[in-house]
Image (cartoon, rainbow, N blue to C red):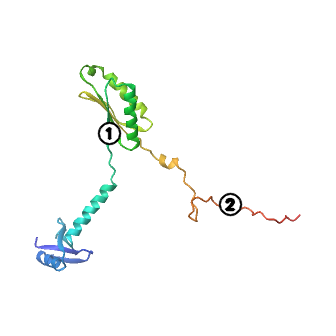
Amino acid sequence: MPQVRVVAEDGEEFGVMDTRDAIRAAREKGMDLVEVAPNADPPVCKIIDFGRFQYLAKKKANEAKKKQVVIVVKEVKFRPGTDEHDYSYRMKHARQWLQEGDKVKATIWFRGREMTHRELGARILDKLEKDLADISEVEMRPRMEGNQMFIFFGPKRHKGSAKSERPAAPKNEGGDQSAPPAPAASPAPSDEKPPA
């Protein structure tokens, strides 16, 4: 590329320059010439400190990573002959994970002759669905895959109910939220007797 459009770090445009002249101008300032728009005609290059540019880009990526919400899928495993106590123990864990905002995969594992009694596994998953109905919604209905039957639960989404649960508190002009609002204009009590 014989010519490039050169822009300074602060946005000042130098215009279209020969590539060698642009590199020389960047070196005189103690900075680097970085191509920022290679598809433009002519390509756009910026005179910046490349080390600082990389540092800021990495910092920006880390900030974005901190703000992203990671949804984890946790799994509870059952067998067709799972006892009531074991069931309730696993159901409580699933409930706790759903309340924390995670998704839950409930799996029934079949071995050997148990495959002929799939209805036992389906009953356990139906019971789990009913027990978790107040805090979860089914994302994937029970399905058989190989020797496993599974179902996915996700935390219940609140459509507008967050606003309706808490009524808005009246705002005071003075900034003191604990003070009650001033009463409407009412006559102040006085020691004088009304004229008769």
Q: Residue 132 placed where, x, y %? A: 41, 34
- In the rendered structure, which amino acid carries the disc numbered 2? Ala
Q: Count up the numbered dots.
A: 2
Q: Are marks 2 and 1 in contact (CB under 8 Å)?
A: no
**Quadrant of the drawing holding the N terminus:** bottom left
Please state which of residues 91 and 69 is positioned toward the viewer in this rendering. 91
Secondary structure type for disc 1: strand
Between disc 2 and disc 1, whose residue precedes?
1
| x then y, percent, for residue 12 | 25, 77
Taking depth in this image into account, of 180 and 184 the one nearest to the observer is: 180
Q: Image quarter for residue 90? A: top left
Q: Amino acid at mark 1?
A: Lys
Which residue position holds label 1?
A: 74
Q: Is residue 8 above or below residue 153?
A: below
Residue located at (17% from left, 73% from top):
32
Residue identifier under label 2: 184
Q: Is residue 190 visible?
A: yes
Tell me the element at label 2: loop
Pick the quarter of the image with the C terminus.
Answer: bottom right
